[in-house]
Amino acid sequence: MNQDFVYRLKSEWFGNIRGDLLSGLVVALALIPEAIAFSLIAGVDPKIGLYASFSIAVLTAIFGGRPGMISAATAATAVLMIDLVKEFGLDYLLAATILAGILQVIAGYLRLGYLMRFVSKSVMTGFVNALAILIFLAQMPELLPCDLFGLDLSNDDHGGCFTGGSLALTYLMVAAGLGIIYLFPLISKAIPSPLVCIVVLTGLALWLGLDVRTVGDLGELPSSLPNFLIPNVPLSLETLQIILPYSAAVAAVGLLESLMTQNIVDELTDTTSDRKQECIGQGIANFFTGFIGGMAGCAMIGQSMINVKSGGRGRLSTFVAGVFLIILCVSLGDMVSKIPMPALVAIMIMVSVGTFSWSSLQALKTHPKSSSVVMLATVIAVISTHNLAIGVLVGVLLSGVFFAWKIAQIFRVSSQLSEDGKERTYTVEGQLFFASVEDFNASFDFKEALEKVVIDVSRAHIWDISSVAAVDAVVLKFRREGAEVQLKGLNKASETIVDDLAIHDKPGAMDGLLGH
């Protein structure tokens, strides 16, 4: 057996058994209310999200590219399926999940995950901060009266939001939970403090008969293991046309969130992981999840943070989280349903505080303004749309614009006239591309009576069609004025693109210019 494989097997699966087991249990408990909530967002039964979280966690533990990262049903993918479920039903959701998995596997083999190298540090920081804020805001329905959200207090569909004394009791329990989470490590780090928080607050709630919301108030837990099924949809082009847009959106958003979370876990654990394998692993997980009645999912930064902060590092922690989740739901559902929501809210607040990059606030004073604008724009876009893909896209586009602007600023063209006044040499320095074309064009005097013009680009690089077109225009305009033009100093890459695309040395070039 390959020694490298044996080493990876031991280190990734059995290098941190105790820590992975305990952290996996904490994550499993924290996954339950979120999986139920995400199911309700998508408009399906709670068991759809719970089955998905079980399946995705187990399969990404085996096939994923990032040990210790938690993947399950998520809000980011659930919101994309709302209209599909409303219009066509659950079976089309399952079919779309299967197709999304196939698309993600293809993306993995095409190495599309390596596009992450174009995501700047500012975008990553914005992504992290936005998620931290969203995680905190997601706890507000448990901490504020329902009427603040425009809900009917008498509607039991909302799980009975609290007012008066019960709400005050919730605050006390959340505060107690936070106290346990942050102070218990001072006594002992042998047991993850979030697990202690859940056990202690659950015990207190049952012993004192406290009137607080519980996990069971969110929805009924499944009482049986998932069964293999094939979605009841026609195998036709029409079905493909219906589900493909949803599947493509889920695949893209799922991979984006997974790869961003992967980078964060890499930094937290000071390790590296495999982007290609992560894409493939996410795809395999979603593909098979659709056949057991589960919805699509992806990596979860909140649960991944809980796992890492609770001591989870290996694939075993993710695997255990999925296995514990289904065991807790099926075998211990009555006990799990009695876990008070304030205990889980306290854990998620801890995750929110720990996820937010507080140093980025101080850095606003010292970092370049463009970097700060990118970070803030990413945060605002994610929070306002609740769509991670849109936020990251805004950040990446702004990063590209600012980078192009900076590069264009160091572009310059200087010139020198010969002693006899008949020849002028233009020296081009910097990167000639779409953003610097305007400055390039404005640097030449076409009204000057010259016999020869030399354009020296030995200190420049020609990048794109826009720059080639600009060179063409300048050369042809000088020739129209009767000057001989020499373009010299092209490096190999610039020469290649000019030879392929330029027209100034091709027959009929002057005719085309005059005709224009």
Image (cartoon, grey):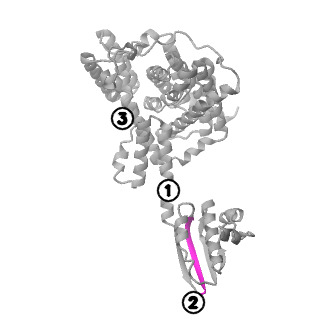
Question: Which numbered dot is residue 419?
Answer: 2
Q: Residue furthest bottom?
A: 420
N-terminal label among 3 and 2: 3
Query: Which residue is the site of mark 3?
Result: 353
Question: Which numbered dot is residue 403?
Answer: 1
Q: Report x, y in % for residue 54.
A: 54, 21
Give the structural element (helix, strand or loop) at label 1.
Answer: helix
Q: Which residues are magenta?
A: 419-431
- C-alpha gap between disc 3 and disc 2: 70 Å
N-terminal label among 1 and 2: 1
Question: Which numbered dot is residue 147?
Answer: none
For the residues bearing labels 3 and 2, Cβ distance under 8 angstroms: no
Estimate how packed mark 1 is, as few (under 14), some (14 to 19) or many (20 or more) residues with alpha carbons within 10 Å: few
Kindly report which numbered mark, 1 or 3, lies closer to the viewer in this rendering.
Answer: 1
What residue type is disc 3 on?
Answer: Val
Q: Report x, y in % for residue 252.
A: 57, 36
Q: Nearer the viewer, residue 24 or 45?
A: 45
Residue 286 shows up from this direction:
yes
